[in-house]
Amino acid sequence: PERALAVVRAVERVLRAAQAVDAGLEQLRSPSVRAAHDDVRAQVDALVRPGFVAAVGAGRLDDVARYLRAAARRVDRLPHRPGRDADLMAEQHAVEDAYRAAVAALPPARRADPDVRAVRWLLEELRVGLFAQEVGTAVPVSATRVLRAVDALGTG
């Protein structure tokens, strides 16, 4: 029962964080931030979707809540620095594109391996590091580090 209660509380934190992001996104109406709005919306939709608790596992729920807190911080800052956000988003997307290409090149049976999933979570850590550094990352992260991990997938 204690473990179940802990999971329910973690899910509650995730859902509250997602609601905060959604509330911030509703306030963004300027065409100059549309691409960032859509990027954050896609991030939230990928993190919090039907079945997300089983998909990410109980041990990762606090990380998901942190990723969403970072996304909310990004949304709060967005109207004040849309150009900076666009530059950071381009950096993030370049790393994500490299990851998608590397995963597509893997044999289908390998795509769900732990090292492949680990890089997917590094991409979320990179978002925290780029857009809301003060929220804190679980591990040291940079685009270069993530790209090294992406390159290692081909040799794993």
Image (spheres, rainbow, N blue to C red):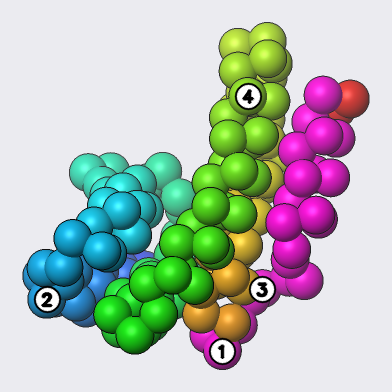
**Where's residue 22, x and y in %?**
17, 69
Q: Earlier in the sequence, mark 2 or mark 1?
A: 2
Please name whichever residue, 34 or 121, is drawn nearer the observer in this view of the structure: 34
**The magenta stretch spans residue 84:** no
Question: What amino acid is labelled 2 in the image?
Answer: Gln
Question: What amino acid is labelled 4 in the image?
Answer: Ala
Image position of 79 with respect to 149: above or below: below
**The magenta stretch spans residue 135:** yes
Residue 39 visible in image: yes
Most common secondary structure along the magenta stretch: helix
Residue carrying label 2: 27
Is label 3 in a helix, a strand or a loop?
Answer: loop
Gap between marks 4 and 3 measured at Cα: 25 Å
Question: What amino acid is labelled 1 in the image?
Answer: Glu
Residue carrying label 1: 134
Question: What amino acid is labelled 3 in the image?
Answer: Ala
Gap between marks 4 and 1 measured at Cα: 30 Å
Please name whichever residue, 23 or 31, is drawn nearer the observer in this view of the structure: 31
Number of residues whose C-alpha sits closer than 10 Å to that of mark 3, classed few (under 14), some (14–19) or many (20 or more) = few
Q: Residue placed at 66% from the left, 73% from the top?
A: 138
